[in-house]
Amino acid sequence: MIDHSMKGLLTSLSRLNGIHFQLMDENGRILFTCLPESPSLSIKNTAVQLAGKTLIEDSFQFRYDGRSQLLCASPIKTEDDMSSVLMSIEENCPSDNGTVHIENIRQFHTRLISLIEQHLTLNEEVDELVEELDNSFEDLNLYSRIASQIKTLKFSDEMLRSLLRDLLENMRAHMSFASFPDLQKEQMHILKPMAEKEVPDPKDFAERLIQNIPPDEPSLDDHYYILNHSYESPEMSALAKKPFRFLSVKVQHENYSYGWLGLVSFEMNEIFRRGELKLLTAMAEQLAVVIANTNLYRDLERFVINMVRSLVFAIEAKDVYTRGHSERVSYYSMLIGEHLGLPEKETNDLKWASILHDIGKIGIPEHILNKPGKLTDQEFGIIKNHPRKGGEILQPVDQLAASLPGVIHHHERFDGNGYPDGLKGEKIPLTARIIAIADTYDAITSTRAYRDSMQAEKAVAIIKDVAGTQLDPDLVPIFLNLYEKILVHEVN
């Protein structure tokens, strides 16, 4: 109510003109007083009555005892409807011409009340501004934190769930939801516990909220819809027994709409702030960019996949004896990788490396690849160059950069006598050691230009024999275990 500066003003006026002031609420509770410690008149009961009458009649009131004591009261009103009464007590009021004096006191009260109300209004505006700045700071902090996260991520259900959780925790809402028909199998929503009884079927509730947005709503031109009281719309009001507020923003990028982000609140003593609309809009814009970039990434990934398939077909068209070899090596390699529990990225790198491990053969003449007899030293030298040649072919493709070690080093031997770099033991990349086992097994069990295929049991025996020399002795038992559990059934 009255702050230190206004109390100081009233105290100074009292000293100057001898009129004492007292501030009271409608119940007679004293909020401020500058009465002398031992007033010469008993005013308490009269002041309480006068204060009550002033609040009821909303007007200037006074009591004059006809001699020298004048008690006046004027109401103070503020925009938030907080009411109080300013009392002025004059002990030496002139007995002659009292009517004129009272009129002067009325004018004095009017001007003083106006000054106090302006001061209070200004304080309220300052408080609102401070609160708005505080909210804006929180909004900016939330925006900065979330935006920095989602910019680094591809669109996914987990990323979206995290975004909805952050919005719900930091904004005045009881439910957050996202609806992207073309991206998700189902609409996603998060509720605070108190909202669960109000929204027994959140999925249906969110869908009907979106469906009931008026198509001619002017705010849709700016890609949002706001409803601060569901009773304003019969269609919306019918969706829940308890009144609610609803704010939803389109997630749109370059005139393409992916869907909606929405907030629902059952706290009706508030409205959605403009800052909250701006924050949700900013989040929607960031999310739209992430979705668009994710789609571009997936398009690029599909392009790379198709390019890889074309390269594999080109290899197998040159070497008729290795048709299907790349797919089989990839299959065996992925079984080993799955058993090892490789992280997602390493699994992806292994997949591409195993499919493309022989890509360098595309530059080898067909008469060498399909030669039925023994290769000369020069011809074998050309063959030995295919892993490094494969790395050179794939190097310009950034998406395959992490797969290059598996392609380049899949012919290294565990004892260090392999090619192209003579790496030994665990210095050989893990993907290359895995591919080496899968490649060896399929090469033995496949028909080649220079020999017929061997039985799977023979291949298993050979792999056991070369464990520790050609192949990783720790990985070979894993392959053999997989052979017993899976591959032997496929062979038979």
Image (cartoon, helix red, strand yellow):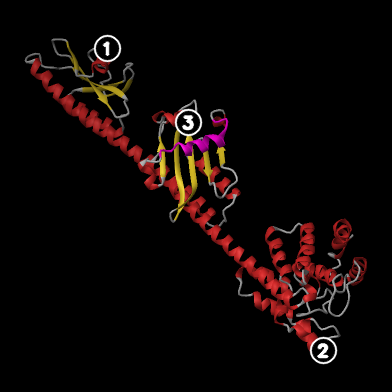
Q: Is residue 410 above or below residue 52?
A: below
Q: Which mark is residue 305?
A: none
Most common SS among magenta residues: helix
Rendering quarter of residue 30 = top left
Q: Amino acid at mark 1?
A: Gln
Horizontal relation, residue 439 to residue 76: left or right: right
Give the numbered dot on residue 266. 3
Label at residue 49 = 1
Nearer to me, 298 or 198: 298
Q: Earlier in the sequence, mark 1 or mark 3?
A: 1
- The residue to which callout 2 is attached is 377
Within 10 Å of disc 1 (Cα), the crowding (few <14, some 14-19, many 20+) is few
Q: Amino acid at mark 2?
A: Asp
- The 10 Å Cα crowd at callout 2, few under 14, some 14 to 19, many 20 or more, is few
Q: Quadrant of residue 110?
A: top left
SS class of the residue under badge 1?
helix
- Magenta residues span 199-214
Q: Which label's residue is closer to the chain start, 3 or 2? A: 3
| Residue at mark 3 to residue at mark 2: CA–CA distance | 82 Å
Residue 69 is situated, as x and y percent measured from the top left of the image, at: 17, 14
